[in-house]
Amino acid sequence: MDCSIYSSSSTSIQLSPRSTHPSWHLKTNSVSWSSSLPKLHLSTPTPIRRKDFTVSAAWTRRSGGEVAERPNRKSWKQRTDMYMRPFLLNVFFSKRFIHAKVMHRNTSKVISVASTNAKDLRYTLPSLTDDNACRVIGKLIAERSMEADVFAMSYEAQKNERIQGKLGILLDTIKETGIIFY
């Protein structure tokens, strides 16, 4: 690599890697303000590009094969949520009945179940889908969950589901009975 240094005087120093002593050359430069500033010119050899050489991606990126193996990686919250909130309330309203159950997320075991289609409720309730039936189902779910030593549960609403009407009545009844929603 050759290096040239120009200074405000009319002299220039040429450095070459082969020689240990600088070789002095006398050059005449114009006397102007910009010529009085020192100038440094470095010349570097151009790199040779090889066609078979590939640059690997950064260590944080995944290769194409790795992305195909795990296309939908879940977030930390999605992976740990089943352990942080293990009991999930599942409610289904049909045209004729109301079904509710509490499940353990990790083991998928059903902790408590209540339905207006059960024999003990089917013949005692005047209507199987009205607000009073929602209150009865909420109270039964709460009592049966407490018997199974479950005092806290969570309810995850569907994408466009609002907690109002019959669902709101059912959830409020469960809260009033003593179950904590987290």
Image (cartoon, grey):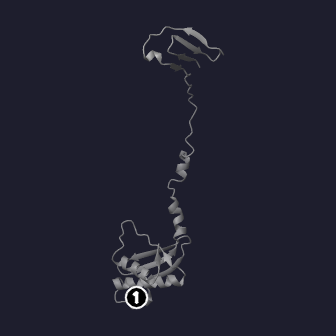
Q: Residue at x 48, y 75 (%)?
A: 153
- 170 vs 32: above or below: below
Identify which residue, 71 or 84, lies in the foreground: 84
Question: Relative to the observer, which residue lies in front, 61 or 33?
Answer: 33
Q: Which type of secondary structure does the marked residue at label 1 adopt? A: helix
* Residue at the (42%, 76%) spot, across then down: 91
Q: Position of 19 compared to 91: left or right?
A: right
Residue 69 visible in this rendered orientation of the protein: yes
Q: Residue at x 44, y 11 (%)?
A: 31
Is residue 116 in sight in this rendering?
no
Determine whether 26 is above or below 89 in the image: above
Query: Callout 1: 10 Å neighbours few (<14), some, many (20+)?
Result: some
Residue on which the image places disc 1? 122
> Measured from the top left, where is residue 36 in percent x and y?
47, 16
When the figure is inspected, residue 31 is found, relative to residue 51, above or below; the finding is: above
In the rendered structure, which amino acid carries the disc numbered 1? Arg
